[in-house]
Image (cartoon, grey):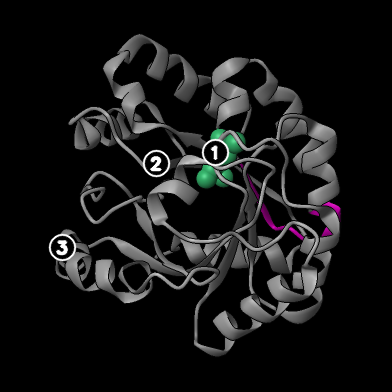
Amino acid sequence: MTTVLHRIEQARQDCEKLLAVLIDPDFGQDEARLERTVQQACMAKADLLFVGGSLLTSAAFDHCVQLVRRWSDRPVVLFPGSPAQLSRHADAVLFLSLISGRNPELLIGHHVTAAPTVKALGLEAIPTGYMLIDGGKPTTVSYVSQTLPIPHDKPGIAAATALAGELLGLRAIYMDTGSGAARSVSAAMVAAVRAHVDLPIIVGGGIRDGETARALCDAGADLVVVGTAFEEDPDLIFAMSEAVHR
Ligand code: 1GP
């Protein structure tokens, strides 16, 4: 069986870049809009659909994942903000350790709570080192996680943190400035992490145009994640896909 992690690792080996569309689970409250977004993402040949968020304001998480699964022909990957964001309708879950922070709940506590459910649901768990990078303003994830982001201009800290994650056995690194951030991770920081680790690098947060996405790919990102920009302008997904897959 081809797993989602295998798909990402294979793309890395083949120098192929991937695009993931992040769906806010609260979208499930507006089913017509959710269906349009999912169909648009599939038409634009986005490679993966991520579902998750740092804070949910509706109780319909599982229903949202079920709808995304129904309308998508792409792998559906959970990007959970809490152990409550698990669903049997997904293909995989990013099993995230917030390695840029020092909050023990996000380094091991939530994992203990979630592990039996992940196992029972038969979800593929992708051990992922999540690194929050300063994106110019506080974001929901920095507030909710109660952690200090890595300074935007300190690529050395990011590289050392990612390397520690690799030595601990994690299988992917996710560099994120948080949803709706004022700016994305810098290409220089992605390049520094790329020079130090051999893992797939996922980059997200504040990416609003194809040029930025392309520059991050050229610096060493393997998978680019975009959410807010598509919520604001769903047609942007086509240009973004073209830039990433170029
Ligand atoms: C957030 O990386 C994702 O965790 C996507 O961020 O919503 O800013 O695109 P945006």
Front residue of 12 and 131: 131
Q: Is mark 3 within 8 Å of ligand 1?
A: no
Answer yes or no: do the residues labelled 1 and 2 have beta carbons within 8 Å?
yes
**Callout 2 amino acid:** Gly
Q: Check if residue 246 falls in the magenta segment.
A: no
Q: Earlier in the sequence, mark 3 or mark 1?
A: 3
- For the residue labelled by badge 2, is the local secondary structure a helix, a strand or a loop? loop
Q: Residue at x 74, y 56 (%)?
A: 152
**Res. 192 visible in picture:** yes
Disc 2: which residue? 53
Q: Is residue 195 left or right of residue 167?
A: right
**Callout 1 amino acid:** Ser
- For the residue labelled by badge 3, is the local secondary structure a helix, a strand or a loop? helix
**Callout 3 amino acid:** Thr
Q: Which residues are magenta?
A: 217-225
Q: Earlier in the sequence, mark 2 or mark 3?
A: 2
Answer yes or no: do the residues labelled 2 and 3 have beta carbons within 8 Å?
no
Disc 3: which residue? 117
Q: Measure how far apart labels 1 and 2 are at the Cα level.
A: 8 Å
Q: Measure how far apart labels 3 and 1 are at the Cα level.
A: 26 Å
Picture quadrant of residue 187: bottom right
Front residue of 171 and 142: 142
Picture quadrant of residue 205: top right
